Image (cartoon, rainbow, N blue to C red):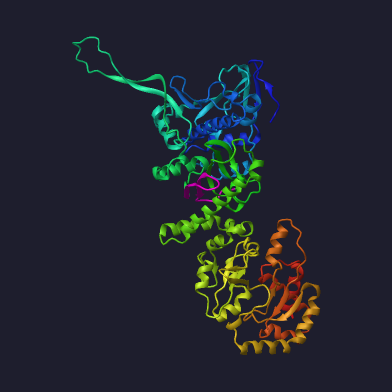
Amino acid sequence: MSEATQAEGLNPELKKHTFEAEVAQLLHLVTHSLYSNADIFVRELVSNASDACDKLRFEATNDDSLYEDDGELKIRIAVDEQAKTITFTDNGIGMNEADAIENLGTIAKSGTKAFLDKLSESQKQDGQLIGQFGVGFYSGFIVADTISVESRKAGEPADKGVRWVSDGTGSFTVEPITKDTRGTAITLHLKEEYSEGEDNYLDRSKIKRLVNKYSDHISLPIQMRKEVWQEDVVDDENDDTPAGGEMVLTDEWETINKASALWTRSSSEIEDDEYVDFYKNISYDMDGPLTWTHNRVEGRVQYTQLLYIPKKAPVDLYTREQQHGLKLYVKRVFIMDEAEQLLPMYLRFVKGVIDSADLPLNVSRELLQESRDVKSIRDGNARRILTLLASLANSEDSDKQEKFAQFYAEFGDVIKEGLGEDAGNKERIAKLLRYATSTQDGLETSFEDYKGRMKEGQKAIYYLTADNLAAAKNSPQLELFKKKGIEVILMTSRVDEWAMNFLTSFDDTPLQNIAKGAVDLGDLQDEAEKAEAEKAEETLKPVVDKLKAALGERAKDVKVSTRLVDSPACLVVGEGELSPQMIQMLQQMGQDVPASKPTLEVNPDHPLIKKLESSEQFDDLAQVIFDQALLADGGQLEDPAAYLKRVNELLMR
């Protein structure tokens, strides 16, 4: 932001500032693109006012003088038809000059670039992202050509107030004012098109409807001046003119919302629409939630949980700086917005509210980190979400099954992280996982389903990891299993191989990666096959020894394969070793990866392997066979040019 300058020809105390670059970009998008749902400014400004009151209530737990003999927190909305303005007033924490410059002139929250990129994707947006990155205040510029803010911070003198004014085009002014009451008043000077016709926000009934729609759950009273019907007075008793009348504004303020926290009410009293509206308000997601759970938990720790699962993954789900967590209240007093300690990381997409009866009112993030009560709440939240997901996954209701499929498509990879992060719930998580298999392409097969289809005598759950489904289905590692009609689970997510390090069995049945270690089919492989494999190993020993010498340090070992049917060779890593895909992924993340060499297994029945023994180009052919096996396994060649040169030379001979 540029340095402040005195506004030319104005109050010498009036200072002009330039908006931060990203704010200027945001304001351009707001004023030129976000016009399909202008109503959101009501939701955002009421929400900001509520946050300001919550912050005061929290600060006052240590210093009740901040209430300044006015402990009744409230939000008021005033409409002035003559001036064409709407004013949102709260008696919350308020701001001084430094706060106004920082809060209204910059976007401090991380992820702003992602927000701007997302907002730029369409010429016409409905504003569902507004507020997600802490930029809800700027939604006022959708309907206003000028916004003025008057504020004074609680506990500071009356002459330390501040007035902030901007037309949203690139700069704003601040000046000191005297303000007798603490809190903030935000006045929107409406654009012409929003002060008349269908989009007239000077219509008080319209504002009331929007408050009821978006902000009915706010636990503070939201007030507007009361209107009453006043009949015309007829002076002449003989006058036959019908008596008329009109609605007139009084000086009395009436509460227009329920003014009770939704989560404190019994779930039997709350309509689904109320749950959905509350979710939209706390998440800034206009799609509504996929599902939710609302419970009061009794026990050593007492708390109320209202937890939502979104329909769509947020744009910053895999961003390291992503803010996540639940809104934390203690005895209905707001404590913090994103208490990440209340959820394990693999459930970071969950939104909602926790209201604890046992945590101290002055609890900090540091205390949350160390609190046994918080650990109990976190564990309870995790169990509740996993139980909710299991109820969808196991339901015979087609709508619930569809909801689970929708959830898994968006968050299945994140859930897998829990195998390594949450040992206590590993079994619950494993039951939720769904995969494609060598016989079914869709993400529909659970480990339990697979076990129900296992062949008689099969003693392991077989799986294969690959970069994508096509690569998995065409992997040489599958050939023996296809020949014998043994189903194999195909794992095609980048997180799968890492996650499976933490899951070695399911329901007492071991899991075996068919690309690691020796393939032992046990009772599924007859004695004749075993004898034939031993004979092939003895016959091909000279070729194997020669391959070891030709490949040198590239291969850990060379063996005769029992798993190949159609392919000449494949690469196999030992149990506990990293696959080529895992090595590649870790290297792309900038991590140092310990050296790991695969074993080359060759198919004794393949013509190319039989040709090796008498080939004059043995060394070149050996390198090509190894490189092709590496490519088939999803690895990358260290020297692609050398590979192409060898192939070309072999083709020309």
Please state, as top left, top right, bottom left or bottom right, where the C terminus lies in the image.
bottom right
Q: Position of residue 603 (x, y in %)?
A: 67, 82
Residue at the spot x=65%, y=89% of the render? 532
Q: Nearer the viewer, residue 336 or 577?
A: 336
Residue at the spot x=61%, y=49% of the render? 375
Please state, as top left, top right, bottom left or bottom right, where the N terminus lies in the image.
top right
Residue 128 can be seen, yes or no: yes
Q: Position of residue 361 (x, y in %)?
A: 59, 36
Q: Is residue 201 above or below residue 110?
A: above
Q: Is residue 443 above or below residue 514?
A: above
| Residue placed furthest toward the front | 300
Q: Is residue 580 above or below residue 365?
A: below
Look at the image and say whether residue 298 sits in the magenta stretch. Answer: yes
Tell me: 266 left or right of 28.
Answer: left
Q: Position of residue 229 (x, y in %)?
A: 32, 21
Q: Which residues are magenta?
A: 290-315
